[in-house]
Amino acid sequence: MVEKFWSRWMDATESLLWFDTSISDQPMKSEKITVPDGVTSLRAAALVMSDNLGLGFTPLPQKLTVSKDFSLSLDVPSYLIRGEEIVLEVNIINHLEHDIEVILLLLTTLFPIRPVALGEIEISVDAVSAEASDSLVWIVNVKPEGVKQSLSETLFLEVEPLKLNSSTSISFSFPPDVVPGSQRAHVALVGDILGFSIRNLDSLLQMPLDSGEQNLIHFAPNIYVLQYLNKSGTTPDEEEIRGRALGHMLEVYQKQLSYQREDGSFSPFGSSDTSGSIWLTAFVLKCFLQAKPFMQIEQSVLTRAVTWLLEHQGPQGEFREVGKLIHTEMQEALDSGQVGLTAFVLMALLEDESYADPGNLSLAQSYLENKVASGGVSNYSLCLTAYALALANSPEAGLSLEELTSRADYKDGVMLWTSSASLESHDLEPSSAQIEMASYVLLALYKRGSFVEAIQLLIWLTKQINHIGGYRTTQDTVVALQALACYSAFSGANAIDLRLNITAPESQFASLFSINSSTYLAYQRREMNTDTDINLNIYMEGRGFAIFQMNIFYNLESKAFSQILQLAKEEEAFTLDVDVSEEKDHNHVMLSICTRLKNNAGVSHTGMVILDVGMLSGFSLSPGAAAPTELIRKMDILPEKLSLYLDSLNKSEVCIILPLIRKYKVARVQDAMVKVYDYSEPTRTASRTYNSDALHNMNACFFCGENCDRCRPGITITSPLLSSSNSRNDYSIPCLFLGVTAFFIRV
């Protein structure tokens, strides 16, 4: 039993070991424990409870020192890019008082000095002396070169009531400049419009998520899944889904409280902001009120937030933003009035009317009704208003929906709306604002019982979901999943009985799927061969519907990607100039990034902007360079990239200087990428690749000295790629440097 608990201590994920035992009538009890592999000190203490003697404890902890004759450390990054050369540096630390002679054995699996095999590889280093031995195992992920690309194609598959079967097809051709070996593809099926989202409740977005608004992407979707479960009755794996959703909510709730200020408001970065945000406070309030049926929400958190909001209500019932608004679309709406923000706040207050004075609610409702009647409300604000008035059971909600119908653009028979802040682009991908607006209209139609009118819009929204179950941002994902959850509970999943045969002869792919009342929430996935272009044929029979996805992932060669960017440069929302210069030596690099909002962006200024800076392999941000500024509110530092949260961007150029320092000895450095995008509208973006000619052309001998004379002879390297029968020149090793350092520590 003890060893089971000790296992997490052994891999350093736990710093404390707890276990209990019963000694009954025995005078003593002993347990065998394996100590961790390393040089450390352990302290042990014990507590004992007895019915007769009460509580007892050890007066002084017992100390155990774990020692070794010597130990190894390996200086190697967690990832490399194919084509790069890595110089391994092994350190031997002698813990004895005298010199020792050690034989080193370096064993590598599929890892020549310049890796050509993609995926995880294992490096094993062994050191043996006459007195002891030690070994290290390290996993390195070899990634493909080039720039990541992905495509998700979602289909709403249905066998119509009067038919016995149905068929369709879907295809994809890889571009000519695809990086060999980088292609991956799979198909996936679920029998419920929330199926993909339920599977990935903890990872619905692939973007930085560390602000008061972004944190809620891990909170709000769980609420709508729980609401769906309550409405739909017994579902497969219901208890597991409920437990997972509640676990996420409890964890995120505590973190969200760190963004609440002393006055009860919430802001993107909490107390470091100059003021609370009306918009964010309303968003948090809405989520917390919706969560009340499922978990304990502190009453004071709710009452303080409501009080602060109502203190900022205007005499006509409107709400004006007093803090930092990170949502660009809402910010643009505020430039032409307070309608959108007032509707957003009213939605939150109407989740539980007992927290606000009826007079305040009535005043806000009247303000919106008057604005709708007088006209001139933007599409975005009108969509929010339609839902807010539908929640208030106002007759003007119908007028709002009628006005939206008259303004709609029809695409494949589906009503859609554009925003005044839309980017001037020919991009076929819908914007985050379009998804938000469609979702609010769906919610308004649902509240009014207009289900027939909602069907086509519901199918369209389902088809926009990405491969991890989310959309593009926190806001569009939260609102879209709220809408999908409302309709999903009435989708008749229990009546599903589908059999699907999916084939792609050229890819040698064939797979059968079955979806019924027991499996409709199950995520069914099959990997595909990507040696050729993909042409899928889908045949289905039975009754009901399914959501199908084909997900494609590949890398595009950096040169080809840059050429595409050059052709599309006029459509980018930001200018972006990236310059890299060497400082002092090849171990220090200065990265300069300059950007501004372009005139075609559709807005005069943005809300929060994310600047993703890919790191050149072997480099990291210099210590002390991560301090927040007025522009850079926060930094997320990861091994392969740096994410900067920028307060806002406008038409004036800003430049950011990032000092980078070498952490690992990597040569033939491949290109990295810098991307800037509006957090609330990621289609508003610009990207560039960058590199240093000196770092790219540098080979491993730079670290080994002239003619690689510092490379140590007598090292045995074993690898299938290096056997005498292997004739591929790609796997030759130009040099290998093992830096052996002895440290003497008196014990």
Image (tube, helix red, strand yellow):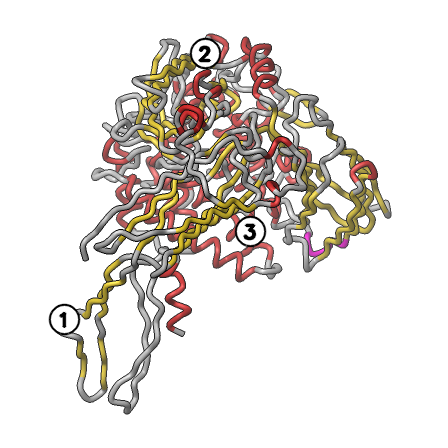
Q: Are marks 1 and 2 in contact (CB under 8 Å)?
A: no
Residue with the mark numbered 1: 60
**Looking at the picture, how far across and down is residue 148, in whole percent?**
57, 29
**Looking at the picture, how far across and down is residue 171, in whole percent?**
76, 31
Q: Name the mark on residue 575.
A: 2
Q: Amino acid at mark 1?
A: Leu
Q: Main secondary structure of the magenta part?
A: helix
- Quadrant location, the N terminus: bottom left
- Given this view, does label 2 or label 3 mark the residue nearer the observer? 2
Question: Is 178 placed left or right of 716 in the picture?
Answer: right
- Given this view, does label 3 or label 1 mark the residue nearer the observer? 1
Q: Residue furthest left?
A: 59
Residue with the mark numbered 3: 228
**Looking at the picture, how far across and down is residue 291, in whole percent?**
42, 50
- Of the numbered discs 1 and 2, the one sitting upstream in the chain is 1
C-alpha gap between disc 3 and disc 1:
55 Å
229 w.r.t. 64: above or below: above
Quadrant in the rendering for residue 322: top left
Q: Nearer the viewer, residue 220 or 617?
A: 617
Q: Residue at the location (57% across, 43% down)?
A: 110
Q: Which residues are magenta?
A: 493-497
Q: Is residue 647 magenta?
A: no
